[in-house]
Amino acid sequence: MSEAPVNRILRSSIVDGPGNRAVVFLQGCNFDCVYCHNPETIALCNSCGKCLPACLRGALIRGNAPSSVEASGGPLGAVLWKKESCVFCGACLEACPRNSSPRVRLMSPGAVMAEIEKDLPFIRGVTVSGGECTLYPAFLLELGTLTREKGLTFFIDTNGSHDFSKPNRAGEDEGLLEVTDGVMLDVKADPGSDEEHKRVTGRSGYDILGLGEFLARRGKLYELRTVVSPGLFDAAALVDKTCRRFAGLDPRLQYKLIRYRPIGVRRLQAERLAVPGDSLMKRLAAICGGYGIRALVV
């Protein structure tokens, strides 16, 4: 049985796939996006202890975990989280120097489903996000299988760094695409420009558009997504390039154009980013419409 570090489970969301859905946020990401709204999901906790003095409720301690304490994620160690004492104020996240969270739980797919199934009458499916959830393919495969057995749909939110067209060397994701009903794929910058992609994400560009085409032809690509901030990259050129590649592949495909907003971003470099105006967002939506792709501006 596989396990993965779970940052949190959102019991209800209407913006992470079709219908009301439970969302599982996994810890750990191979990107470091300048505008990341969930920077505390990037790194695994190394139990450095910098968060301990920030917690005024005694929800973080050092030592071996008794039964009432859920251990933090990552390389499980000295910093332990007492969920029953936590008021989720976020002070520990602000104190962490490495974009992590001491509240992460190492969970099996079965344990995750045990929490989700409490809300089965009210949800249509499960979406796994992050961080970057495809860092844990075996976990995804098991959770996707359990989700489908419950009569729910299973969606994956990814940055495109995982190649669904071929199993990984360990074969951990053999059959993953078969249990996945839809993929939400981030197009964060021009993947053909290493300089641009590194500036935005900290990593070279992958063949994200090629991966998207593969998923679209398999009927698995639910949504493309791009965060827009004027001056960060040429959004109009990127949207046009992307829509040109996907025009006609799947009439159900939508392109979510996300307006960058500084709310919730706790990164100094993000303070320099500009918020796009209505005129730019309408222009981008019009580009999508010209290729027959439905745009969703948020």
Image: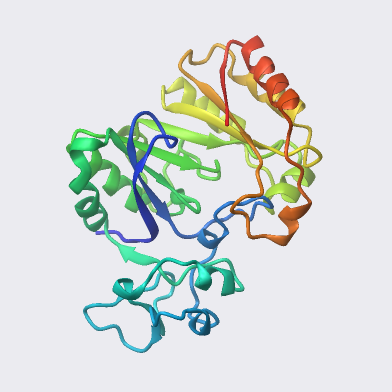
Give 71 or 274, whichever is nearer the viewer. 274
Q: Where 12 falls versus 209 (above or below)?
A: below
Q: How many marks?
A: 0
Q: Is residue 188 left or right of residue 58?
A: right
**Quadrant in which residue 102 is drawn:** bottom left
Q: Residue at x 45, y 27 (%)?
A: 222
Q: Residue furthest bottom?
A: 63
The vertical placement of 241 against 151, above or below, is above
Q: Residue at x 24, y 83 (%)?
A: 66
User: Residue 152: where, in percent of width, then height?
Assistant: 24, 34
User: Where, quadrant-wise, is the N terminus in this rendering?
Assistant: bottom left
- Left or right of 82 on screen, residue 266: right
Q: How is the image coloured?
A: rainbow
Above or below residue 202? Residue 158 is above
Question: What residue do we see at 39% from left, 53% from top?
Answer: 170
39, 11: nearer the viewer: 11
Q: Residue at x 32, y 71 (%)?
A: 83
Pinpoint residue 4: horizontal percent, then vertical percent.
36, 60
Q: Picture coordinates of residue 208 (x, y %)?
A: 60, 36
Is 191 situated above or below 30? above
Where is residue 210? Give x, y as percent: 59, 30
